[in-house]
Image (spheres, rainbow, N blue to C red):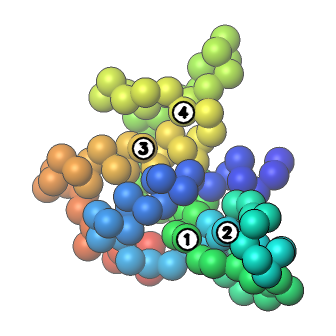
Amino acid sequence: MKIDKQVCSIRQGKRLAELGISKDSYFQHICVMPDPTGEQWFYDVFSADTKCDTLAEYICPAYTVAELSVMLDDLEGLIGYDRDNKNWYVTHELPNQPTEAEAKAELLIYFLESEDDYINAEKCNRLFSL
């Protein structure tokens, strides 16, 4: 499976950073510009230690399923796979997501935005450091 199907979306990576998730992910969303004029560009996911031979700009962390699972702690049971529709669903009335990573990121964003006492950015960062 391609790595871009195993990480959260750019929108979710940016939102998690805004909500205080400060730990670096093993992967990053980047904008690659092989043409120095900037006329040609594309988004990609690279591991944080990959050296890029062309001009590339860091966008945000690309948290993996495993990294998001650690941050969600025992809330992971709120996510399931719908075999009929071939997508991931999250309870709490959130929209279905195309990948497990995006479903987990959406759930984490939901809890961080709700300012629930059970899960917060400080706890996520601490769990992610263990």
Amino acid bearing label 3? Glu
Q: In terms of secondary structure, where does tag 3 sit?
A: helix
- Quarter of the C terminus within the rendering: bottom left
Q: Which residue is mark 1?
A: 59
Q: Closer to the N terminus: mark 3 or mark 2? A: 2
- Tag in front: 4 or 2: 2
Residue 58 placement, left or right of 103? right
Q: Closer to the N terminus: mark 4 or mark 2? A: 2
Q: Which residue is mark 2?
A: 31
Q: In terms of secondary structure, where does tag 1 sit?
A: strand
Residue 70 placement, left or right of 39? left
Looking at the picture, does residue 75 appear above or below residue 64? above
Q: Callout 4: few (<14), some (14-19), or many (20+) C-alpha neighbours within 10 Å?
A: some
- Which residue is at the front of the view, 23 or 14? 14
Circles 2 and 1, Cβ within 8 Å, touching? The answer is yes
Q: Position of residue 75 (x, y in %)?
A: 37, 45
- Tag in front: 3 or 1: 1
Q: Closer to the N terminus: mark 3 or mark 1? A: 1
Q: Which residue is mark 4?
A: 97
Q: Position of residue 9 (x, y in %)?
A: 56, 51
Residue 68 placement, left or right of 86? left
Circles 3 and 4, Cβ within 8 Å, touching? The answer is yes
Q: Which residue is mark 3?
A: 106
Looking at the picture, does residue 3 appear above or below residue 95? below
Is residue 66 visible to us here?
A: no
Residue 12 placement, left or right of 8? left
Instruction: Tell me which corner region of the image, top left, top right, bottom left or bottom right, holds residue 98.
Output: top right
Amino acid bearing label 2? Cys
Q: What whole-number distance in Å separates the C-alpha atoms at marks 4 and 2?
A: 23 Å
Q: Position of residue 2 (x, y in %)?
A: 81, 52
Amino acid bearing label 1? Ile
